[in-house]
Image (cartoon, grey):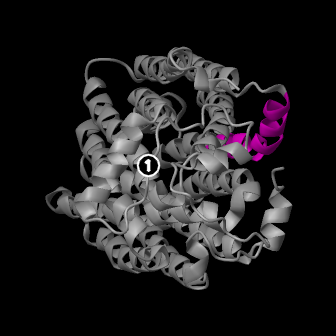
Amino acid sequence: MNSTYAQLLKGNRNFRNLLWGQVVSELGNWFNFIAGLGLVRLVSDASPAAAGILFACRLLPFAVFSPIAGTFVDRFSRRQVMIWSDISRVFVALAFLLVTSAENLWIAYVATILISVIGAFFEGAKNATTPNLTGKEGLLAGTALMFSSRFLLMAVGSALGGWAAAIFGYKIAFIINAASFAISAYSIWLIPEAATREGAEGENGRKGEKEKRSGGAEEILDAPALVGATPDIEFKKPERESFITELKEGFRYTIENHFALTILIMNIIWATGGGAINVVFERMGGIVFAGRESWNPDLAVALLWTASGFGLFLGMMIAHRTSDLLDRRNNHTAFIGWSLLVHGVLFSVAGLMPNLWLFAFFTFISRAIVGVEYAVQETMFQRSLPDYIRGRISTLDRGAEMTIFGLSSYFASLAIYKITPESLTIISGILSASAGAVWFVRQRTNSKFEI
């Protein structure tokens, strides 16, 4: 039985601290993103290539270092990794204050790369820790709360970041970002070390279960409603192999486990279209609708990110009831595939809209649908992973997705010289929808996707 949001938040102080740390740092991150994008637009005379480089600097380093970070957090203290990641990002965030012209725009790129690299270690540690803090019963609620708060902050942070940049200038946004990392570090510091690893007695009264090192099969047997979560082979945990050996073990698990590989392939396909959203919002909001309807460019871009964030937040918040319904009907497979297909089609339709509000509306609906899908999919995925290897697998999946996401952003910024932003929006939606087709194809090739 899945715990409700209220039960998890009320009875689990460690999870509350982790969630609060994410909330404040994500708020600051969106201040940084909107302000950084506006700053680049200002000093580069609205160059699409300059914006594309910023997107690549934000995404690709995260992707490249994620597998390394995942192995790192499986070997060392996840709590310490998160604390030091936050502290180091305080100083890096302040480097944006030094960018005053096109000649020193490189500082923004370097600072963005560093924040991205450090963020890979923080995310790896946080993702590997979350299931241990929530327990199996609270994992769906915990996953939904972690991601819904992130997407809510995408909405609120984008809106506030755009407002602050328009009223007070970019420097205030960068200072807020730095302060948010300091608050997050303190929040993580309040979590006991033992709570971040499986086997500790959690505040939810659940004694951590002994890992049998069988690829998480015992957890899947306890959750029969999960679709496709059964591992294909056994993976036995070594006493303590070398860093490289454990890194390879993560790759091997992903390639040889049908469900893990399906999630990886599907997320990569989705990212081919999903990555273009950065350029779509920047061009449609900051250029097309700003010129057509006299919007302030920063506010127009912020509005689109706000619509996207609120849509994803809504999707995450209804994921709990959706998952309960899917459990009763045993219909996870169809739900995931059709949700991906429909959300992509709706985003393509947004590219045909004549004004910013209609564009934002279709963006909102599209993101709400994929928000529900992602919460269900991610919960299935996390429950299928054994604790000793969870950091490596989750960061490998995330890293591969973000690699394509970053490349998609960069190539979309180049494509905008040849096609209209409206056309790019339509193409982005079609590519994202194709992930649903991939899901159905992979489902048919393995009977373990069926209950």
Q: What amino acid is at disc 1?
A: Phe
Q: Is residue 407 left or right of residue 185?
A: left
Residue 313 picture location, percent across and down: 69, 46
Which of the 4 image quadrants contains residue 74?
bottom left
Q: Residue at x 48, y 48 (%)?
A: 298
Q: Is residue 47 left or right of residue 70?
A: left
Residue 402 seen by the camera: no
Residue 236 belongs to the span the image colors magenta: no
Q: Which of the two residues, 267 or 179, is positioned nearer the viewer here?
A: 267
Residue 64 picture location, percent across and down: 27, 50
Residue 264 picture location, percent across and down: 43, 35
In the image, residue 387 above or below residue 12: above
Type of secondary structure dominating the magenta stretch = helix
Q: Which of the two residues, 106 or 151, is positioned nearer the viewer here?
A: 151
Q: Residue at x 45, y 56 (%)?
A: 389
Residue 29 picture location, percent across and down: 48, 62
- The stretch in magenta equals 309-328
Q: Residue at x 39, y 35 (%)?
A: 256
Residue 315 belongs to the span the image colors magenta: yes
Mark 1 — residue?
235
Which of the 4 image quadrants contains residue 428?
top left
Quadrant location of the C terminus?
top right
